[in-house]
Image (cartoon, grey):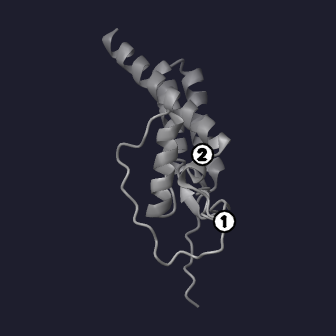
Amino acid sequence: MGRRRRRVREPGYVWWAGIGVLLVAAVLLTSWRLALIALLCWCLYEFSLVPTACRVMTRQGFACHEPIRGRLFACSAAHQQVKNDALWATVRLPNPFKRESVPDPNRDTGVVVYSPSVRAKLAENDRNLLALAAVGTIVALVLAVAGLSA
């Protein structure tokens, strides 16, 4: 009765088709600027638009399967805090914006509880695609600035 109806999302191939059209147009028009726009669109897609699952480890050790948009985001504030910790840990830095968590007084006992350091790990494919998107963003920005000065 109280189930929330989820919005229907566009399939991922729509974004891939759009990025492909930009790349084909860049090749046909021999426009490096259009190729940079296609690269930035792909980076934006991977960071914040790709339909995926939360994948934060729950306290019992199972991955959260709630649908989200973007590899940088999570399904709830608590999961977002864990994901932020994982993103900072990927670059070997502590999260400077970490909020101190208050222990839950209603926590179930008798259940194996995974520590935050175990829970705050990104899936390998997420880690790899985020690294590629970050490198792509940096390359596109550097080339755009170099193109403006030329």
Q: Is residue 88 visible?
A: yes
Residue visible at 61% across and 43% down in the picture: 126
In this view, the residue in front, 74 or 118, is 118
Q: Is residue 44 visible?
A: no
- Furthest-top residue in this view: 150
In this view, the residue in front, 133 or 97, is 97
Going by the numbered disc 2, the residue's amino acid type is Leu
Question: What kind of element bears circle 2?
Answer: loop
Residue visible at 66% across and 41% down in the picture: 125
Residue 61 shown left or right of residue 46 in the figure: right
Residue visible at 60% across and 75% down in the picture: 109
Image spot of residue 13 (x, y percent): 65, 48
Q: Identify the image quadrant of residue 149.
A: top left
- Furthest-front residue in this view: 110
Going by the numbered disc 1, the residue's amino acid type is Val
Image spot of residue 119 (x, y percent): 59, 53
Above-or-below relation of 2 to 107: below
In this view, the residue in front, 100 or 30, is 100
* Residues at discs 1 and 2 in contact (Cβ within 8 Å): no
Residue visible at 51% across and 27% down in the picture: 135
Task: Kindly report the distance in space between the C-alpha atoms of the residues bearing marks 1 and 2.
Answer: 21 Å
Could you classify mark 1 by the number of other residues whose Cα lies within 10 Å: few (under 14), some (14-19), or many (20 or more)?
A: few
Q: Nearer the viewer, mark 1 or mark 2?
A: 1
Above-or-below relation of 96 to 8: above
Image spot of residue 67 (x, y percent): 59, 62
Residue position marked by numbered label 2 in the rendering: 122
Residue position marked by numbered label 1 in the rendering: 112
